[in-house]
Image (spheres, helix red, strand yellow):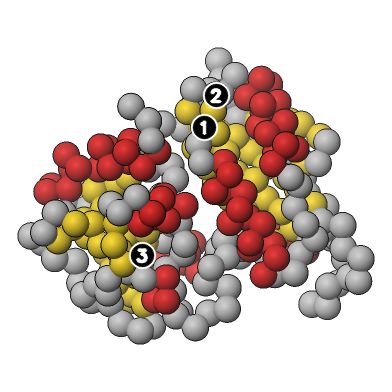
Amino acid sequence: MSHAIAWVEQQWGHPDRLGVPVSDRGLGLGDGVFETLLIRGGVPQLLGEHLQRWRDGATWLQLPEPPNQQQVEQWIAEAIRRSGIADGALRINWSRGSGGRGLQPPAQAKGRCWGSLYPHQPSFQRQQVVISERVQRWADDPLKGCKTLDYSAMVLARLEASQAGASDVLLRSSQGGLCCGSSANLLVQEGGQWLTPPLSSGALPGVMRARGVAMGLIQEARLADSLPNEQPALLLNSLDCRPLNHIAEPLAEPLFVQLLGSD
């Protein structure tokens, strides 16, 4: 039976039984980046795109250079072999590593990598959302393009959703207009065209979002401050494509499959 697997550098085990050193700056300060990607049939989906964003974030944060794609592929293959998970969600983390106390990074940081693989099947189920009153995306945030290890604001947003009886929230941009969900890009269809807020709004540069823009399936446009009831809308990331109203329900899975380039 498939079960979750994790690794910290060269150690393997269950995610609940492995540990990152308390001195790691990723643990203490959120000083690092991560990627989450889909494994389908034992094959990592859009791995090159994910690792490019991983490297870009590490460069922006001036982290040590992350492991190369060959090393990551070896870890993924080993995780699949050990766990038996052919369809799953893989997360890979890269921190500045250990460096004592305080904000100042060590002069010669070595970096630390750890990851996990859990069973996962893409979901296309309708999701109930509320618009957050506590959290927004800041257009001028210098880290808006990075998937950093500090996701506390998004945790707060998801708590707001659950306390309101919803599954997720929609976040507004500091520039105005809806921006994204807590862990996914927001798409609204108008006249048969999928629209999503521009990156300048503070929206995370999602891998599936970027693929849709490159394919001409998604265009950037500022959205209204509320979700239109008469237009299809969904939340898209690398693991799921969740419709937000009944009009979008038949559209979610075909779009996800098309973006992955699979049948």
Percent position (x, y) of residue 161?
34, 61
Q: In the image as oriented, which residue stretches furthest toward the right?
A: 108
Q: Which residue is mark 1?
A: 39
Q: Is residue 228 left or right of residue 54?
A: left
At label 1, the amino acid type is Ile
In what quadrant of the picture does the C terminus appear?
Answer: top left
Query: Whole-Å distance between the Cαs marked 3 and 1?
Result: 24 Å
Q: In the image as oriented, which residue stretches furthest toward the top?
A: 1
In-front residue for pair 154/247: 247
Query: Whole-Å distance between the Cαs marked 2 and 1?
Result: 6 Å
Q: How many marks?
A: 3
**Which element carries disc 1, helix, strand or loop?**
strand
Estimate how packed mark 1 is, as few (under 14), some (14 to 19) or many (20 or more) residues with alpha carbons within 10 Å: many
**Which residue is at 60% across, 30% downward?**
4
Residue 42's disc is 2
First of labels 3, 1 by sequence position: 1
**Which residue is at 72% across, 31% downward?**
74
